[in-house]
Amino acid sequence: MSEAIEQVSAVLDRMGAPRALAPRLLAALGAGAAERLDADPWLLLRLPQVTVEQTDFCARKHLGEGARPDDPRRLAALTAHVLRMSEARGHTAVEEKQLATVVGRLGVADPAAALEAAVAEESAVVLESIDEGDEDFDFEEGGVPELPDPDRFYALPDVGHAEQRLGDQLLRLIGGNDPIMDLATATETVDEASGRGGFTVSEQTRDALVTVALRPVTVLRHGPGDAAEVARALVCMEAIATDSQVGIAVAAPTAQAAAAVNADLARVRGTDVDPASAGTGDTAAPEGTEGTGEEERPEAPPEAEDAQGAEEVQETGESPGTGDTRGSESARKPGTPPVRAVSLAGLLAGAPVEAGLVVLCEAMSVGVRRAAELASVCADGAHLVLLADPDQAPSATPGQVVMDVAVSRTAHVAELSDPAEPGPIAELAAAVAGGEVPRVEAPGREVVRVPAASAEEAAHRVVQLVTDSIPRALEIGAEHVQVVAARGDGPAGARALNAACKERLNPGPGAHGGFDVGDRVLFTADGPGYGPGDTGYLREVDGGAVVELTGGGRVRVADPSALRPGWAVTVAAAHGGRWPAVVAVFPPEVPVSRPQVYTTLTRATRHVSLVDATGGGLETGVRENAAKERTTRLVGILREG
């Protein structure tokens, strides 16, 4: 145990709190955590699992008569606690009256004093916005319209400042307003690029690409079955950037999403791609397999295969579709290297970005903090493109960047369109977007529904699918299958499924902070070359943890507490990633929403198994629970700018 953890544990002992909270408090409070906690016991509320009642009990034990209900430290902590709960639901700010109401429900006699205390303690910031009305003013007889009073919002400092910074940086890019090409040249370039590449793009896609060349910030929408059209559009954007000599940078939120984009690009360019490791979602299963998309109960896996799986990931080399394709047929001009997608963490690590055209794929998964970082590293005059599927859930972190940018009317919105028939995964996802969960024809077993009568049975089915059924029937190795769970706890939650998958795929004592070499891991924090949502395999532990990301790159983990088991992840953690096969599990009584199910389905590029133990709750949730609104300020910031 480190000295810092021991010091925090000693303070917890004095206030009657469990010592097990020490590591998480140290991570939340940072340097000087013990001294800060000793001076302010209400800092316990920084941990979401600690209640207000528990914190008040510990404060009274620690401070005695000094623990008053109106203590400014308590008032500030309660206000920040409400803001953190709002942040967890995706809000970037809370309107003043609403915040005061919620704080008052916690037993605070003077909510206004609590809000003032939070600002004084710098645990909250006040932000003002003026709502632009659409009313016409009567200027007759010298009348002058009165400006409306500004709306006041409160936010956690890092979130509030990040959203303001994002708005300011987007306005900087929008203010550049210089086209990369004129309309006629851009149209000609797109046609020439598609001709050289031996493909065509739809009229709608061509128009969208011209918009990208003309406008500084563009939201480029696409649907669930448009991976190939997105790749063709990226190749055409590469031609626009090359011909105009501005350069292009393409990023995806995670390393695994970048690898999937690169695989799609390789197909468009005509290079070989291993279908087991990267696919486009509608590739047929290997010859000899059968499937109809109907409910299926897989056979139990042979006992002899208990310990096989994760160790089969290649230790060296690039993932298919991410290597050099200079010698292949493509839409680029001879002698120029092909564009490759990189993870957003990788792009930011190389900041500033000098490219004149910057494209972010899977942009719906990016919240205000990460989007602010991206916009900040773009050069003056650069064009920023947010490629997004609008039916996906908004980001797991605060904000709804793509939707706000589109609604603000300060950027341009265009849409890609692929006239090809959608495959089974795209067909099901499109139906879910419309509020239905129908049966779909899946002759290549692209979609399989697996019923379960209980959470325990659902967990059993998941392990079968990952370790036996999918590798055997579809020749997609277990290392390329991602379990996506609708909840983190419970018998069929991500934690339990991770334990079950580890027992089968990489059994071990967890000798290195709960992990063993060969374990699949999930990143939950930023670091050099990695970011939240990245998954990989633990390869080394001596001298620090080394993780191999999808695509073959290795990163040294600065803070081991950023790692979690990664065989099974929640929907929020999966957002922004793409994998060849996904096993989606919905346990009984889990809250189900339409964006949640849609996002889960669209994480898969070749196959999805839908393990359903909801007893009809899946269909009901998709039909009745659409997206929840979030309170954000980005629209106002952009319009006021």
Image (cartoon, rainbow, N blue to C red):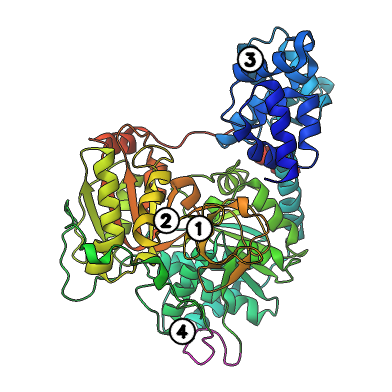
* Residue hosting label 3: 101
Give the alpha-carbon distance from disc 1 to disc 4, as whole Å: 38 Å
Compare residues 118 and 488 and report the one nearer the observer. Answer: 488
Give the alpha-carbon distance from disc 3 to disc 1, as whole Å: 41 Å
Displayed quadrant of residue 210: bottom right
Give the alpha-carbon distance from disc 3 to disc 2, as whole Å: 42 Å
Other residues around mark 4 within 10 Å, as few (<14) / some (14–19) / many (≥20): many
Residue beneath the point at 51% across and 77% down: 322
Residue 29 percent location from the top left of the image: 73, 37
Do callouts 1 and 4 mark residues in contact (Cβ within 8 Å)?
Answer: no
The mark lying in front, picked from 1 and 4, is 1
Give the alpha-carbon distance from disc 4 to disc 2, as whole Å: 38 Å
From the viewer's perspective, tell me whether residue 113 is left or right of residue 434: right
Magenta-drawn stretch contains 408: no
Q: Residue 197 carries which label?
A: 4
* Residue hosting label 2: 567
* Residue hosting label 1: 521
Residue beneath the point at 64% across and 39% down: 24
Q: Which of marks 4 and 3 is nearer the N terminus?
A: 3
Q: Can you see residue 445?
A: no
Give the alpha-carbon distance from disc 2 to disc 1, as whole Å: 7 Å
Amino acid type, residue under disc 2 in the picture: Trp
Do callouts 3 and 2 mark residues in contact (Cβ within 8 Å)?
Answer: no
Looking at the rendering, the stretch of residues picked out in magenta corresponds to 324-335
